[in-house]
Image (cartoon, helix red, strand yellow):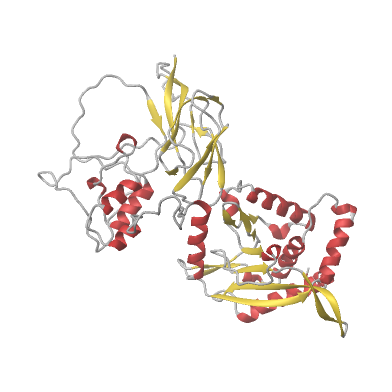
Amino acid sequence: MTATMIKEFRLPDLGEGLTESEIVAWKVAVGDTVALNQIIAEVETAKAVVELPSPFAGVITALHEQPGTVVEVGKPIVSFEVEGDDGGSGSGEPAAKREPNLVGYGAVLEGSGRPARRARSFAAPVASAAAPVPVLEHVEAAPVVQAHPAGIPPVGIPAAEPGGVRSAERPRSTPPVRKLAKDLGVDLEAVTGTGEHGLITRDDVRTFVGGGDLPAAAQELAGVSTQDPAPAQGARETRSPIKGVRKFTAAAMVSSAFTAPHVTEFLTIDVTPTMELLARLKASRAFAGYKLTPLTIVSKAVLIALRNHPTLNTRWDEAKQEIVQYNYVNLGIAAATPRGLTVPNIKDADRMSLLELSTALTELTDTARAGKTSPANLSGGTISITNIGVFGIDSGTPILNPGEAAILALGAVRKMPWEYRDEVALRQVMTLSLSFDHRLVDGEQGSRFLQDLGAILADPGMALAMV
């Protein structure tokens, strides 16, 4: 016999341990019938806007969060009414139901993986019999046991029951909340949860800390403001929360700037031959319909020059005290988007022809500007390029993308008086700015790479000698 049941879908980790996402827009409404993997919402992570597919086929019964709300991983966002087996078949085998998986990987069969987890309890009393209640299933974040930091006494630990045994179950919370509590030395058993079914949220921990006697530094760590509230409307200042891509970019850049010892070198070159080559390619039938720019040619030149300078395509592994040499190139391209700077990368760009690279660059930039870049394409880069010339800037000192050894900034192409064949002529000139991690790249290695790259752009025929 088939019956209906209510299923909750909790916000999943959308990639690389991201702890929260903002609901940008719902694509469905209460009462809508949706199919498996139908797009039901757009959510913004710290890296990009991601389309969220439905993990179930059924009817939407509730939308738990409004657009603009920042939701922690593991918190319910939508409920479905779905068809399910009431267990009366007597077959002894679990029904084949669908359960959500990570975004981008579709749904997977339920019951084929590990068994469901039960909440741990300590000397918990046996519950009395109760009347049957509607079936309510959900996807729950995996529990993580957190110990209090050494040397930091837990705050607000309740008194133990006689015999030293606590009778309460472990408080319900998500991994990010438990980590925050651990960092602050807060015992979650002393915190009252205001979330659904008593779930302890990040705000609950912040409220607990803000109402205690902890110093201002600890309150700031918890996100509790120690300053006056923002001015009223019409005041001389306007404040907005730091979140999404802007928050992620800021944290990554600060980490990079204070971890890797940056060195920046500059080289100004005559790129007239490259610009002439670009004009010929645009006019050729072979490249008809392709979008070719100076960035396309420079990207190809970087990939060619890297073959003789592999140290610029490496990573410093601090934990293992190793230098990781990449035998492939995932070329990152910095893209300015309405939500902030992102650096998506082209996987295995070193294996692409100029035509393939042109197509990949066009798709990458269009997707990034639309805010649709997937988390997978925002990670795993090995070296990056930022084109500041499109803003009319000649040179700069770019900050390394975390985990990479080098980043190249392209300046604007300008017509300038330049020495050409022992005379002064009006030529097209560009400045290249190369920042690199001095732990991985010596000054000589960085200089020779920049010199070879400049030689290719000053005379594209030089590329034949480097292939």
Q: Residue at x 18, y 40 (%)?
A: 167
Front one among 290 and 327: 290
Front one among 99 and 367: 367
Residue 309 lies in quadrant: bottom right
In the orientation shown, which residue stands out farthest toward the left?
162
Q: Position of residue 72 (x, y in %)?
A: 42, 44
In the orientation shown, which residue stands out farthest toward the front?
234
Q: Residue at x 70, y 49 (%)?
A: 363
Q: Residue at x 61, y 64 (%)?
A: 326
Q: Position of residue 451 (x, y in %)?
A: 72, 77
In the orientation shown, which residue stands out farthest toward the top?
1
Q: Position of residue 362 (x, y in %)?
A: 72, 52
Q: Residue at x 60, y 57 (%)?
A: 343
Front one among 402 and 398: 398
Relative vertical location of residue 218 with respect to residue 413 in this rendering, above or below? above
Q: Position of residue 1 (x, y in %)?
A: 44, 14
Q: Quadrant of the C terminus?
A: bottom right
Relative to 139, 433 lies left or right: right
Relative to 213, 319 lies left or right: right
- The mark tally for this picture is 0
Relative vertical location of residue 248 with respect to residue 54 in this rendering, above or below? below
Relative vertical location of residue 31 with respect to residue 182 in this rendering, above or below? above
Residue 215 lies in quadrant: bottom left
Relative to 417, 401 lies left or right: left
Residue 293 lies in quadrant: bottom right
